[in-house]
Image (tube, helix red, strand yellow):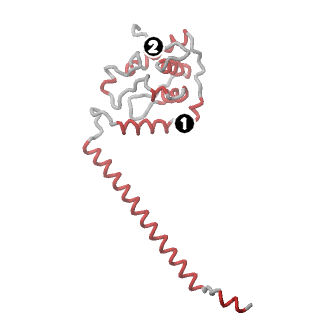
Amino acid sequence: MSSYVHLVPALTNVDISAQLCEAAVEIVRMLRIVAAVLFGVVLLSAGTVLWFLKSEGLSARKKPSDFEYALANFALGQSIPIYTRGLKNPLAVNDENIREAQHHFHEHCAVCHGDDGAGKTAVAAHMSPEVPDLHADHVQKWTDGQLFYIIRNGVRFTGMPSWDLADDHIWKLVLVVRGFGPKQSREKPVADNNR
């Protein structure tokens, strides 16, 4: 039995300590590399933002780039609570609700979005970011609940205000926005320009 003991080298406390020190040195070296890369990324990002602000500025006279629109739409999507996705409009699509919805839309929304929902009005012409066309796919993809949330709470850094209106009032506005989408099994609520 003693012959086997001589075949396995005995580890002393000094050997274990040396191996731990080597591992610690390697970990510290890796952490320094990661920190340097992260610092470089932050520095590059900050430089890019500073360059953009100095060269482009935040003037509303210049149309935002496609990247800015994509970033803003992504941020908007992330800011809407998940629970809103499952909310359904409780109002029936009938003549009375459509008529009231058209009136509310004309009263509150048409100044920017236009009675036709295209967002091509005198007020909207000078807004940046642009007023969205309510017929657009990126608007119509929102669920009823998400549209309700956007109308109720507005959208920061845009011209879209929040509205302190009764829930049924906002649901009626959702009916109008839905009416600008693809023809479905409901009447298309287009606001009357003669009001």
**Coordinates of residue 79 in the picture (x, y in percent):** 49, 38
Q: Would you place residue 165 above or below residue 97 in this image?
A: below
Q: Would you place residue 96 above or below residue 119 in this image?
A: above
Question: 182 or 94, which lies in front?
Answer: 182
**Coordinates of residue 50 in the picture (x, y in percent):** 30, 48
How many angstroms separate mark 2 from mark 1 (CA)? 29 Å
**Coordinates of residue 63 in the picture (x, y in percent):** 30, 33
Q: Residue furthest right?
A: 1
Quarter of the rendering containing residue 83: top right
Residue that mark 1 sits on: 81
Circle 1: residue type: Pro
Residue shown at 44% from the left, 13% from the top: 191
On the picture, is 192 further left or further right than 169?
A: left
Question: 91 or 108, which lies in front?
Answer: 91
Q: Residue furthest bottom?
A: 2
Question: 3 or 93, which lies in front?
Answer: 3
Q: Few, some or many C-alpha atoms within 10 Å of disc 2 (few <14, some 14-19, many ≥20)? A: many
Q: Residue furthest top?
A: 194
Element at label 2:
loop
Element at label 1:
loop
Residue shown at 74% from the left, 90% from the top: 1
Tags 2 and 1 touching, CB below 8 Å: no
**Coordinates of residue 57 in the picture (x, y in percent):** 28, 41
Mark identifier at residue 190: 2
Circle 2: residue type: Val
Q: Few, some or many C-alpha atoms within 10 Å of disc 1 (few <14, some 14-19, many ≥20)? A: few
